[in-house]
Amino acid sequence: MNLPLHPAKASVQAIAERAQDHVDATRLATSLVALAAFGGRDDGGVSRETLTDIDLAARRHLIAQARALGCQVGIDDCGNLFFRRAGQRDLPPVLTGSHADTQPVGGKYDGAYGVLAGLEVIAALNAAGIETLRPVEVVSWTNEEGSRFGPGAMGSSAFVDPSRLAGYREAADQGGVRFGDALDAALADSDDVTRVPMARPMAACVELHIEQGPMLEAAHVPLGVVTGIQAVRWFEVTCVGTMAHAGTTPMAVRRDAMAVAVAIAQELYSMASRDTGASTTPGAPELRLTLGRWAVAPNSVNTIPGRVTFTVDMRCLDDAVLDHAEAALRATCLRLASSPDAVTVSRFFHRTPTHFPESMLGPIERACARASAQAGRAQPIRLTSGAFHDAMYLADHCPTAMIFVPSKGGISHNAAEDTDSAELFLGVQALAYTVAELASREP
Amino acid sequence: MNLPLHPAKASVQAIAERAQDHVDATRLATSLVALAAFGGRDDGGVSRETLTDIDLAARRHLIAQARALGCQVGIDDCGNLFFRRAGQRDLPPVLTGSHADTQPVGGKYDGAYGVLAGLEVIAALNAAGIETLRPVEVVSWTNEEGSRFGPGAMGSSAFVDPSRLAGYREAADQGGVRFGDALDAALADSDDVTRVPMARPMAACVELHIEQGPMLEAAHVPLGVVTGIQAVRWFEVTCVGTMAHAGTTPMAVRRDAMAVAVAIAQELYSMASRDTGASTTPGAPELRLTLGRWAVAPNSVNTIPGRVTFTVDMRCLDDAVLDHAEAALRATCLRLASSPDAVTVSRFFHRTPTHFPESMLGPIERACARASAQAGRAQPIRLTSGAFHDAMYLADHCPTAMIFVPSKGGISHNAAEDTDSAELFLGVQALAYTVAELASREP
């Protein structure tokens, strides 16, 4: 039994549906191809690291595209670009977008898709003749990737907390160029663009992104409602033994740093598979464990390793799981150390989980459901993001959430990154619905 | 009840004892200090890689020292230096010696001790007025260490099988210098030295060396009778997985190359400790297992390793133990590989065990027993060598054996390498006895 919606709700829903239905697949595809030409590679990938000449050219291209759509263009002190479509009232805007920079060798869609999707939403609103209550802004964040200047997500994190910017300005790339100097050059390049304040109030933020993982593809689902971003903790485990001759040193007197490191690593892998059951259920609070970086000294065939260092990357949406895993890591290291100082554990980075609010997930779910149903595709699933995104920082600033589209083979940060064009289209449809609804709600 | 020895034996034993008793501690210490000055370092170590200017100067020093002792000096096509003390008859000589080259940073005694011990034996024979039946030759082998030009033990292995030399000549150091060119320069530098043939018959060979391991020190024994040299097999294990994002990739779909490598490594360590009981009994056929060199790609904190390679160094005096261990390694890799080509094992070096003959061990044991008893020290023990030595190749050529003196802390290939001077003295006493006995026996 379908009850009629509350008139105001019905009106908002009608606006959202009209916006969704005016997303144009050809216009989107053309827009994606045009931006991918900036730093485009023969292998299909894109090399467009932040604030390089290629990136600056791409920024000018985006500004021109936004102006052609009737947007006001603004830039803040961290070089974040904002493309604003006015609303009926000058309320805090609904923000969407992502980043246009890439890894040294990246794909066409990581970040760029979210920015161009935002511009396509504006094109759809224009085509539908919709005047939203609130302004809609599309953002292209500076330096999300962090590959040229660390850390990543500089633009979004500085927007949320501008005190971060002074430190970021001192970061230097491998050629010795300071981020601050590259940023100043980009700002000078945009001297025809209005400077807008950082940390401005935003009504909400929605980021559309490729999943960069295999969950949606495995589930044969074109759209994912992202409920949050996993917590992460990074550790360095250092095992110290005694470097000695592989031939002359009896097993009983060895202090083999690699034997200790392997025993610890094996216990960690066992813990991860035991505690999580290696669940494939999307959204389950699985512990993800990666021992990614290793250094062995002296690293010689016939010398017993005297020192082994390896990193532990632990992630889970549930911080309590990481509390448990960290305690287990520390206990394992203590237990397997031959002497109190033979194994040390240091935590060098951590971030608590991001939980996107249900107030955001509802509209996104409705938007994804309608787009998927119209396309005859499976209904959306909820999942968490294993990777960081600009939305992680925006969540500290305003109600925020994300939409994912599938990544073929889960591949990203790679020229082989790809997403089916029909799924890219559905993602923008869902975004248009969500943005139109959020921008049409009474405060 | 002591039975009188056979007159001939008694005579040989008397000669051997007289030689032993004429070893001079001060003369030996002076000789060791003098050679250590060539490449001597402030930290007490020695940097004298083969055929460097420093090594050529050390060779001239040794030649002068040998001539001062009345020796004839010869050099062969591989630059091996022979210092010959004539015997009553022109029979194949008894050979002793070792090598004078060092690791990039080595100690004062690794190799040098064996060469200078040989010259001290000649000094003792001179002082005792002994004319041996056979000639005695002291050798200083070229490039035992193999650090500048690989492989090691070039001089001794080429002496035994001169067909090896042509290949060795093509080896180049990091500066691009060919071994053949460096060798020709050394031969030119020794143009006043008689060229002697390679692969000449030798009656026997005894090499005195520091243990480079902890067994003698742990047993509080100053002299070890080396019964053989362990067999060795070197493997490279390559685990191939799929490089992927540490955050976005669920545990169940990972193909983590490091997780597989760690599981294999853990099984190997378990096998080694289970199969050998990690015996401390000197001479027991213990399996020694070292996983020394690791390469991880892409070796990044937040990327699941896509490729891990590690080396396996297996040693044992009993080749059957290595047969078993190799089979276990291959079975473990097969069992833990997620697909047939996910783990590959390649054996890139092996050497069967060297067993020194009892005909050599007897005289050495008597020599060591007498020297130890006179010094009020514990009786010699039998042990095996975990490291390679020139004697390993000479064993293919003539009856060969070795004597070990302790290494403090088992340390070698290090400036901190050290041996007590009283133990260095006992080693030369034992060598003098052994050489004198072997050189005095009727053919």
Image (cartoon, coloured by chain):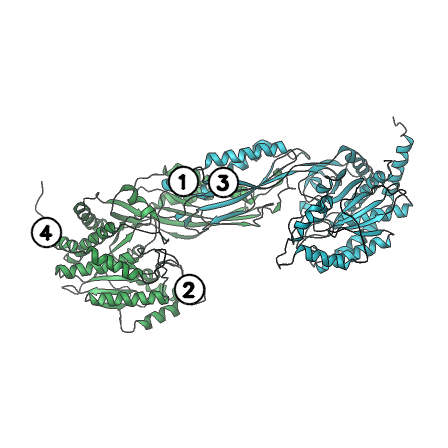
Chain colours: A cyan, B green
In the picture of the structure, the residue carrying the numbered disc 3 is A344
Q: In this view, does B12 lie to the left or right of A121?
A: left
- Observer-nearest residue: B102 or A52? A52
Mark identifier at residue B442:
none
Percent across and percent down for residue A323 are 59, 33
Q: What element carries label 4?
A: helix
- Decide which of tag 1 and tag 2 comes sooner along the chain: 2
Q: Is mark 2 on a helix, strand or loop?
A: loop
Q: Determine the chain carrying the residue at label 1.
A: B
Percent across and percent down for residue A71 are 85, 51
In the picture of the structure, the residue carrying the numbered disc 1 is B272
The relative height of residue B249 versus residue B149 in the rendered view (above or below) is above
In the picture of the structure, the residue carrying the numbered disc 2 is B171
Q: Is residue A73 left or right of residue B275?
A: right
- Decide which of tag 4 and tag 1 comes sooner along the chain: 4
Name which residue type carries label 2.
Answer: Ala
In the picture of the structure, the residue carrying the numbered disc 4 is B10
Real-space CA distance between mark 2 and mark 3, rounded to the nearest whole angstrom: 42 Å
- Decide which of tag 4 and tag 2 comes sooner along the chain: 4
- Tags 3 and 1 in contact by the CB under 8 Å rule? no
